[in-house]
Amino acid sequence: MSVPTNYYLLLSALLFLIGALGVLVRRNVLVILMSIEVMLNAVNLSLVALSAGRQVADGQALALLVMAVAAAEVAVGLALIVTIFRHQGTVDVDDIHLLKG
Amino acid sequence: MLDYVWLIVLFPLLGALINAFFGYRLGRRAVGAVATAAVAGSFAVAVGVLAGLLSLPPEARSVDVTLFRWIAAGSFHVNVGFLIDPLSAVMLLVVTGVGTLIHIYANGYMGHDPDYARFFTYLNLFIVGMAFLVLAGNFLLLYLGWEAVGLCSYLLIGFWYQKKSAADAGKKAFIVNRVGDFGFALGIMLIFVTFGSLGFREVFEAAPAKLQAGGAVATAITLLLFMGATGKSAQIPLYIWLPDAMEGPTPVSALIHAATMVTAGVYMVARTHALYALAPFSSAVVATVGAVTAFYAATIALVQTDIKRVLAYSTISQLGYMFLAVGVGAYAAGIFHLTTHAFFKALLFLGAGSVIHAMSGDQDMRHMGGLFKKLPVTGATFVVAWLAIAGVPPLSGFFSKDEILAAALHAGYWWLWLLGLVTAGLTAFYMSRAVFLTFFGESRVPHEAAHHVHESPASMTAPLVVLAVLAAVAGAAMGGFSRFLEPVFEGGAHEAAPDYLLMGLSVLAALAGIAVAWLTYIRRTISAEAVAARMGCLYTWMQNGYYVNELYWAVFVRPIGGLAQWLATVFDAGVVDGAVNGVAILLGGLARRLRAWQSGYIRRYALSVMVGVVIVATVALVMMRAA
């Protein structure tokens, strides 16, 4: 008995929302990065679900691509965060505003 | 020869340029020589032009010489083109001839002035402008010359600009002229709107067809043109600049404010006679203003003590006679009086200059007297001019003035004729008064000045003699003069039988004026002081020009000055600068508010992104639904 695609999409939407809220609400930079990961994975879920529902491989291939990109992005992001921490001594996003206009 | 007419303009232009750029390097003598040679050259060409015209049959004496196309904008074409006919030939001869004599005189008169190069530059420039004015074949070129001579008048009146009264007088002349020119410009625009062209030939030939005789358009055009003439030719109400213009050097007063520039208005009315013929109301206005101004100015001249002021008001008065003539349709008579007036008025001014030179700069006739013995040539020529302007036969002034009065009477304007006759008497009186106070009687010259009184050098006295001869004999040329101008005015020359009664009355008026002056200032039978005391207030009013200057100052100058002051301080500083600065402040405020967006807070940015995504997604969804 297969699960209807809609359930997957709903879950994906919920996960995306949770991730988005995390980005907006949390103050720790690392947690924000993790929330971004959650958002990316939510998208992955939706891609795979739709691809399975249509019996087509395109979505799953794209999901693999997204995972690769997510990994690269995390690497760079962590490097940036470590440098900022070395500089400012804090990972609180509200205290990092040197680029203000 | 007629094709070389442009040389008349070229010579003085070159003279002006040479003197302007190299004047101080050339030295006094050379500068004067260059300027005089230039004008003399123009005179020679003018004589050639006259010869060229005379070689043509009378019907063909109207030649167009076009130099180049000036403006070609759609249907609006104006060429730099000259119209050569008897009228312009006469004007050219007067301008360049009298101009040459005055240039010769100026060599001597301005001999000690440090700014000689500037003086002769401006003088030559004036001749250029005047030549353009009288040669112009269309209204725009006429206006160009008109403004050019107005500019030169300003420059020359205020020649000694370090003196405040001179600088003010120059400004006054220019501004008052501009008021008149405003009307002139409107008239020209109206002409273009009505005729579609500004060329004299096109306009005058089309006038009878396009304009309804006595109609509103014709009247409007001619009245507007006359407004310009009242400014340039110092008639009521725009004459007030001329007495103050005496601040300029005497050669300037002689050339510009007696012989040539001020006559431009008369020339203009004569030139546009085809239009005035279609507007009898305007012609009547011209004649009336002329006659009234003649009388009015003469009354002021009666009581002036500055010799140049007497001559200034006299000029205004004589110009009134010329306008009376052209107003009643006697165009040839008006132009003839213009010519004779040029001779004797220039002579009077140059003679006055000679006297002032001898008096070390004093112009007050109350400090003169008995100068004839010490200044024989000046005195003798001055006497000739005096008799001419007074209208004593057989000098030229009698012929020209009488012709005007006869024309006025025969045209039906007996009240203007009477005004003219009375003015003739007044003219004789005030000129005689001036002559007697200056040259005859006991000397009232103060001691220190008396030693310096000597006759002027030949460069100054020679032109006086030439002008005296012309002033004396020019009357004989009247018949030929009228015949020469006939083709221009289409039979406007009235060759009426000489009215001996009128002539007798004119002579009587002249002799009466001279006699009363003689009794008052030589025989002392009548006491000038007693008469002045009896007249009381009126005398003071006449001396001060009926306080018209003060009236204009209060009614026009003060309010406009106040408006200008308000505009400069409140409007310009407040509103205009406020608007400009306000824009800057507004932008600054806007920028400050926008800057808040760039807070540097990452969460703020993330929120913006999210909001944007939501909006875009909503819009996309709605549009997909609609589709």
Image (spheres, rainbow, N blue to C red):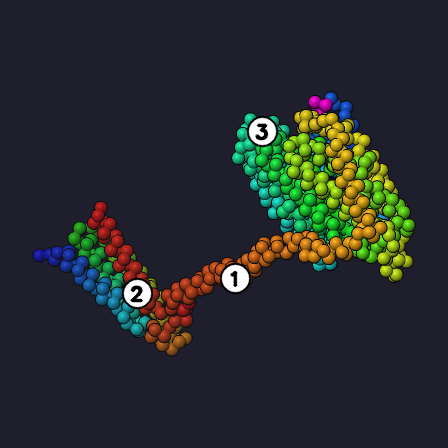
Q: Secondary structure at mark 1?
A: helix
- For the point 41% across and 71% down, which residue is it? A98
Q: Quadrant of residue A78?
A: bottom left
The answer to whether residue B2 is seen in the rendering is no
Residue on which the image places disc 1? B570
Disc 2 or disc 3, which is closer to the eye? Answer: 3
- Distance Cα–Cα, label 2 vs label 3: 81 Å
Residue underneath mark 3? B207
Which circle's residue, 1 or 3, is located before the other in the chain? 3
Output the chain of dot 2.
B
Q: Position of residue B318 (x, y in %)?
A: 72, 42
User: In the image, residue B332 lies at what x, y percent?
Assistant: 71, 31
Q: Amino acid at mark 3?
A: Ala
Quadrant of the frame with the N terminus of chain B: top right
Highlighted range, magenta? B58-63
Residue type pointed to by label 1: Val
Q: Is residue B286 above or below residue A68?
A: above
Residue beneath disc 2:
B607
Does residue B400 lie above or below B35 as drawn? above
Mark 1 or 3: in front is 3
SS state under label 3: helix
Amino acid type indicated by mark 2: Leu
Q: Is residue B366 visible?
A: yes
Quadrant of the rendered image containing residue B603: bottom left
Label 3 chain ID = B
Q: Nearer the viewer, mark 1 or mark 2?
A: 1
Residue B601: horizontal and vertical position, in percent?
35, 69
Most foreground residue, B374 or A64: B374
- Along the line of sight, which residue is nearer the eye, B434 or B235? B434
